[in-house]
Each structure stands twice: as C-alpha cells, then as structure tokens.
Image: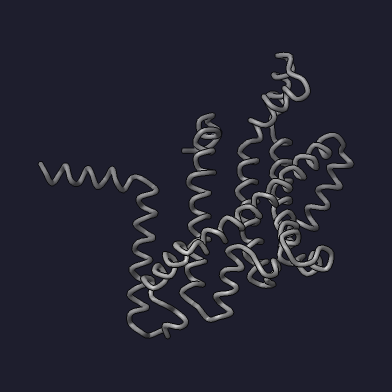
C-alpha cells in the first residue's frame, strides 16, 4: 500500500512541467560535471560546472552580476517599450489605409529578416557607442515581429465578431478594446514572445561583439570582459544568468499571461 502511495506521489510530482524542467537541467549539470572531471577537454576551455557555480556565487555576492543584470534589463525594457509604441502606431496607420498597409508589409518583408546586430555598425556611426546605440539595435530587432503579429492578429479577427460588437453599440476605442484586442491577443502574445527573445539576443550580441557600451554595460559586456581575460568560468556564469532570465520571463511572465487570458478564453489548446 505504501509503495502505491509513493508511486502516486511521484506521478503527481512529475506531472508538473516545472519539476520536469528542473530535473532535466539537473541531469545536464551532472553530465557537464562528469565530462569536465574526465579531463578529456582542457579545463581552460571547459571548466567544471561546480567551478562555474562558485564563480557565479562570487560575482553575485560582489554585486557584479546583479549590477550587470539590472543594466541589461533596463536597456531591454527601454528598447521593447519603444518598439511596442512604434508597432502600435504603425499598425494603427496600416489599418486605416490599404496603401499604408501595403507600404508597411513591404517594409516588413525587407527589414524583418535582417538581424538587429547587422545594423550595429551603422548605428554606431550615427549615435556613437553607448546605451543609445544598443537601444536602437534592440528597437530594430523587436519592432518587426511586433508589427507583423499585431497586424496579422487584428486582420484575422472574424468580421462577425466586429459586426456583433457594432450591433451592441461599440465604436472606436471601445470596439478596439473589447473586440479587436481580445480577438487578436494570441497573435499579440506570440509577437511579444518573439520580440522579447530577439531584443535579449540583440542586447547580448551587441555588447559581446562590439563592446558597444564603451566602458560599461550589461551581461553581454560582462561576458565580453571575462572572455578577453580568459576567465572561462565567468563566461559560462554569464551565459547561465542569461538563460535563467529567459526561463524566468517565459515561465513567470508569458506563461502566466497565457494561462490567464487565451487559455481561459478557450482560444488555444491546454
């Protein structure tokens, strides 16, 4: 009987997605540590996972990692905020005129495939090195998936829903807020997810490749300096922080928003 209870507890425990992910990452860490302990790969190139964690704890206690993380998150928030405002304005303009819609679709087809990091040399020439250049690259990387998903989402709202809203007396902003935005929200949320990922990648890549923030920066700059001085455990520690922030934003941010909106509304599969 006790064995059955234990089996049920394990079944309930492993039915939780977060538990499964933590277990998977624990196994990866154990494999990493085991491979590094064999000495097959030089420690300078592939340090032990325990040494990386020790470095991460040390840099966190000194405030280095926390300061760099705060710097990066502020830059990403600024770039994403500007990209969101730009996307809303561009989409509103496109919805008002077929000609404007065609122009924006043409711009998206030209610029959307272009990586944000590709424009950094030009941005540095225009704005110099510093947070302005990084924010511009983040804006460029994030704005196009936002425009594409917002534009597609609004155009995909069934005309019957729009007409039903009009029959109930909804007009203008009330129609947009009550009918169009909820109907397009799965696309909007998808666009925000892609925009966040591209903005985060653009930030880290800009600082790592060019050191574009000059004498100061965020996590990308942290990795850039550790790589320059061949402090490989510090490089891996910075990468772990970047991955952890991505997981936190996805699990605590976007996943919870999805549960409380589109899943509750029955607009997606569980």
- The color scheme shown is one colour
- Residue 8 or residue 207, whichever sits in front: 207
Q: Residue furthest front?
A: 62
Which quarter of the rendering shows the N terminus? Answer: top left
- Residue 174 or residue 67, whichever sits in front: 67
| Residue 242 sits above or below residue 2 on the image | below
Q: Residue furthest top?
A: 168
Quadrant position of residue 128: bottom right
Q: At x 64% / y 41%, what residue is drawn?
A: 187
Residue 223 appears left or right of 50: right
Residue 36 appears left or right of 204: left
Q: At x 65% / y 31%, what residue is drawn?
A: 183
| Residue 259 sits above or below residue 55 on the image | above
- Number of residue marks: 0
Residue 18, percent from left and from top: 39, 49
- Residue 128 or residue 248, whichever sits in front: 128
Residue 113 appears left or right of 260: right
Residue 79, percent from left and from top: 70, 52
Q: At x 71% / y 65%, what residue is drawn?
A: 117
């Amino acid at each position: 009987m006790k064995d059955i209870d234990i089996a049920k507890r394990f079944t309930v425990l492993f039915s939780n997605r977060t538990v499964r992910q933590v277990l998977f990452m624990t196994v990866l860490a154990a494999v990493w540590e085991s491979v590094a302990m064999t000495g097959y790969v030089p420690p300078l190139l592939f340090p032990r996972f325990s040494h990386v964690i020790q470095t991460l704890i040390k840099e966190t206690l000194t405030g280095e990692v926390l300061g760099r993380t705060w710097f990066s998150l502020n830059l990403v928030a600024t770039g994403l905020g500007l990209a969101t405002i730009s996307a809303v304005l561009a989409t509103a303009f496109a919805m008002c005129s077929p000609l404007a819609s065609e122009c924006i679709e043409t711009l998206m087809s030209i610029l959307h495939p272009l990586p944000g990091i590709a424009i950094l040399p030009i941005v540095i020439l225009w704005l110099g090195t510093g947070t302005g250049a990084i924010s511009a690259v983040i804006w460029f990387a994030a704005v196009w998936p936002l425009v594409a998903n917002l534009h597609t989402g609004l155009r995909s709202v069934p005309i019957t829903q729009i007409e039903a809203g009009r029959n109930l007396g909804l007009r203008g902003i009330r129609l947009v807020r009550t009918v169009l935005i909820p109907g397009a929200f799965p696309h909007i949320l998808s666009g925000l997810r892609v925009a966040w990922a591209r903005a985060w990648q653009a930030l880290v890549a800009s600082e790592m490749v060019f050191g574009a923030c000059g004498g100061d920066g965020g996590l990308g700059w942290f990795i850039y300096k550790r790589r320059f001085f061949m402090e490989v455990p510090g490089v891996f520690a910075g990468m772990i922080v970047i991955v952890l922030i991505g997981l936190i934003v996805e699990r605590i941010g976007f996943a919870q928003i999805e549960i409380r909106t589109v899943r509750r509304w029955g607009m997606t599969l569980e």
